[in-house]
Image (cartoon, grey):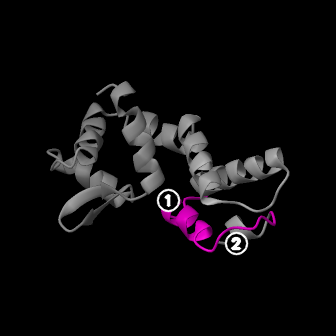
Amino acid sequence: MRLITEPVQLIYPPDIPEQMFELTQGHPALLQKLCKEMVDIANKDLRRQMTSQDLETAINITLDRENLAMRIFWNEFCEDPQCKITVKQILAGQTPTDQYQLLRLAEHGYIIQQAGVWNMRVPLFERWLQRYAEAFKS
């Protein structure tokens, strides 16, 4: 939360910092990227008061631009095509068929099980994957 509120004195509606943390689950690279986009919006508009719409704009910019953390996950961690297939199954709400990849993703904290269903742990990460999944080669 300090990364969101202290380095730059922007004024957020009470729920925005919590939403930013929830979207990134505190992932340092993702949180820093999202915060940078919020600062860029404030600087461009010469204001400090942020809005929910600013957060949506920052999210969309973050999702549109290449992100090193996401690229490393997809191109290096999921270099094995079976990993990509497993991620796509999770995104589709299907039960993953490759137990090794499922355990590997869970062990590294990329996925969590909620009510018996596997999901990506970081919502912003999931949104990026959903947006670009069709461009990914299996």
* Residue 92 location, quadrant: top left
Mark 2 — residue? 2
- Compared with residue 46, is residue 74 higher up or lower down, i.e. above or below? above
Across and down, in percent, residue 114 comes to 25, 67
Q: Residue at x 75, y 53 (%)?
A: 39
Range drawn in magenta:
8-28
Across and down, in percent, residue 61 comes to 60, 40
Q: Which image quarter holds the N terminus? A: bottom right
Q: Which image quarter holds the C terminus? A: top left
Mark 1 — residue? 23
Q: Secondary structure at mark 1?
A: helix
Q: Which mark sits nearer the N-terminus, 2 or 1? A: 2
- Amino acid type for the residue under numbered disc 1: Leu
Separation of disc 2 and disc 1 at Cα? 16 Å
* Residue 18 location, quadrant: bottom right
Along the viewing direction, whichever of 15 and 110 lies nearer the viewer: 15
Q: Which mark is residue 60?
A: none
Q: Secondary structure at mark 2?
A: helix
7 lies left or right of 103: right
Along the viewing direction, whichever of 9 and 73 lies nearer the viewer: 9
- Compared with residue 44, is residue 16 higher up or lower down, i.e. above or below? below
- Amino acid type for the residue under numbered disc 2: Arg
Q: Are marks 2 and 1 in contact (CB under 8 Å)?
A: no
Q: Residue at x 81, y 47 (%)?
A: 45
Does residue 33 appear in this view?
Answer: yes
